[in-house]
Image (spheres, rainbow, N blue to C red):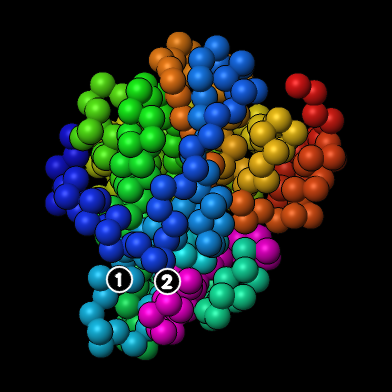
C-alpha cells in the first residue's frame, strides 16, 4: 500500500466533517443495460446528486472545513468541478474564492462557478499555467490554496465514496474509477483496499493526454500535452512534485484502461438512452471500457462512479443526437445510438 500520511481514520473523520455541505450516501443504482453487457451486476454510484453536480464537493468541503478561522479567502486551479466544489464550500463559510482555469475549460463550467459567487481567473492554455496563477494569488494576495487532487484533506474527502460503496454493496468485487490527477482514484482505491483487500480497482481514462497514466508508465510524474476531450474533467497534469496521489494510484490501482473519444461518445449516449442519466464524458469512461470489451475478465458485482453532470449542453445535445463534435483540431464523427 502507499506510504503516505493517509489513514482510514482520516477518511472516516472527513465524512463527519463534510456533513451539511456535501451530500453523503449518494445513490448506488443498478444499470440493467450495462449488467447485460458485462454479464454480471453493474451499479452506478451517482455523484451527480451532489449540490454542485460532481464528486469534487466532497474533497473541497473537507479541505475548507479544516481551514483556520482567520482564513480570508481561497484559491485553486480547476478544470471545472473542483472549482465548483471550492466555490460552494467557501460560500458556506463566507470566504472569498478565486478559481483559476485554463482556456481549455468549457464555458458552461466557467459560468457555473461564477453563478456560485466565486471569481474566475482565466490563465493560459494548460492546467500548469492556471496552477501558476493560483500560486501567485497565494504569494501576493494571501489566499489559501485548495489543491484539486494532491492534498490529503481533498483525497480523504474523495475517499468517502469508497466507504459508501462498501456499506451499500459489500459484495462488490470490482470498481471502475475515472482517473485524472488521482485524488478520486487514489482516495477511493485506498479506502476500498483497506476495507476489502481482495477487491479489484481499475482506473479508466481517455487515451489522449492522460497524465496519470503516462506517469504510471514512466514510474514517476510526467508531463503530457493537453488536448480537448469529451472527458475534459480528466485533463491536466499531476505536477512534477506530486506528493500523494501518484503513489496512491501506483500502489492501490490494479490496472489502468484507456478509452477513445469514440468510445466515450457512445457511452455518453448509452447512459442517456439506457440509464436516463445526463453525465459528463469523464463520468462515462467506465461504461466506455465495459462496452468496448477492454476490461477482459472482470469479477462481479461491479460498480462505476458517475462523477459529474456539468456538461456543455450544446455539445451534449449533439452527442445524444448523433452529430459530429469538434474537439480542437480533431473532428469526432457522430453516429446515431444503437443499443
Name the residue nearer the viewer: 161 or 120: 161
**Which numbered disc flags the more N-terminal residue, 1 or 2?**
1
Could you tell whether 4 is left or right of 294 in the image? left
Q: Residue at x 70, y 56 (%)?
A: 312
Eyeballing the image, is 8 above or below 252? below
Q: Which residue is mark 1?
A: 65
Residue on which the image places disc 2 = 89
Residue 261 vs residue 302, the one in the foreground: 302
x and y percentages locating residue 231 in the rendered image? 59, 45
Q: Which residues are magenta?
A: 86-108
Q: Quadrant of the C terminus?
A: top right
Instruction: Please rate how many residues cluster around mark 1, counting C-alpha atoms within 10 Å: few if below 14, some from 14 to 19, many from 20.
Output: some
Question: Looking at the picture, how far across and down is residue 263, in whole percent?
Answer: 65, 29
* Tag 1 and tag 2, C-beta contact below 8 Å: yes
Q: Is residue 259 magenta?
A: no
**Residue 168 sits above or below residue 148 on the image:** above
Query: Residue 95 colored magenta?
Result: yes
Numbered label tally:
2
At mark 1, the secondary structure is helix
Residue at (65, 23) in percent of width and height: 33
Residue depicted at x 54% and y 52%: 49
Expressed as whole percent of the image width and height from the top left, the position of residue 74 reads: 38, 78
Q: Say whether residue 133 is visible.
A: no
Measure how far apart labels 1 and 2 are at the Cα level: 8 Å
Amino acid at each position: 500500500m502507499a506510504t503516505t500520511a493517509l489513514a482510514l481514520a482520516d477518511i472516516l473523520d472527513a465524512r463527519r466533517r463534510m456533513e451539511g455541505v456535501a451530500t453523503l450516501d449518494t445513490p448506488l443504482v443498478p444499470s440493467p443495460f450495462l449488467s447485460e453487457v458485462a454479464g454480471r451486476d453493474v451499479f452506478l454510484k451517482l455523484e451527480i446528486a451532489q449540490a454542485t453536480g460532481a464528486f469534487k464537493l466532497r474533497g473541497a468541503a473537507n479541505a475548507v472545513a479544516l481551514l483556520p478561522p482567520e482564513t480570508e479567502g481561497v484559491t485553486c486551479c480547476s478544470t471545472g468541478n473542483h472549482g465548483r466544489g471550492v466555490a460552494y464550500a467557501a460560500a458556506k463559510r463566507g470566504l472569498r474564492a478565486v478559481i483559476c482555469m485554463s482556456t481549455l475549460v468549457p464555458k458552461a463550467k466557467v459560468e457555473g462557478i461564477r453563478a456560485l459567487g466565486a471569481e474566475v481567473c482565466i490563465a493560459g492554455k494548460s492546467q500548469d499555467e492556471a496552477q501558476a496563477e493560483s500560486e501567485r494569488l497565494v504569494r501576493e494576495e494571501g489566499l489559501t490554496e485548495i489543491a484539486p487532487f494532491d492534498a490529503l484533506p481533498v483525497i480523504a474527502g474523495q475517499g468517502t465514496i469508497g466507504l459508501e460503496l462498501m456499506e451499500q454493496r459489500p459484495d462488490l468485487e470490482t470498481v471502475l474509477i475515472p482517473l485524472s490527477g488521482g485524488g478520486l482514484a487514489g482516495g477511493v482505491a485506498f479506502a476500498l483496499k483497506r476495507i476489502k483487500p481482495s477487491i479489484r480497482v481499475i482506473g479508466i481514462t481517455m487515451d489522449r493526454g492522460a497524465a496519470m497514466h503516462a506517469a504510471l508508465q514512466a514510474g514517476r510524474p510526467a508531463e503530457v500535452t493537453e488536448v480537448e476531450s469529451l472527458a475534459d474533467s480528466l485533463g491536466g497534469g499531476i505536477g512534477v512534485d506530486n506528493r500523494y496521489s501518484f503513489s496512491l494510484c501506483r500502489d492501490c490501482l490494479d490496472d489502468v484502461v484507456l478509452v477513445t473519444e469514440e468510445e466515450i461518445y457512445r457511452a455518453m449516449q448509452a447512459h442517456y438512452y439506457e440509464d436516463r442519466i445526463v453525465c459528463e464524458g469523464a463520468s462515462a469512461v467506465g461504461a466506455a471500457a465495459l462496452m468496448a470489451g477492454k476490461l477482459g475478465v472482470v469479477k462481479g458485482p461491479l460498480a462505476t462512479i458517475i462523477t459529474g453532470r456539468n456538461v456543455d449542453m450544446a455539445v451534449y445535445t449533439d452527442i445524444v443526437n448523433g452529430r459530429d463534435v469538434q474537439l480542437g483540431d480533431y473532428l469526432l464523427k457522430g453516429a446515431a445510438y444503437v443499443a
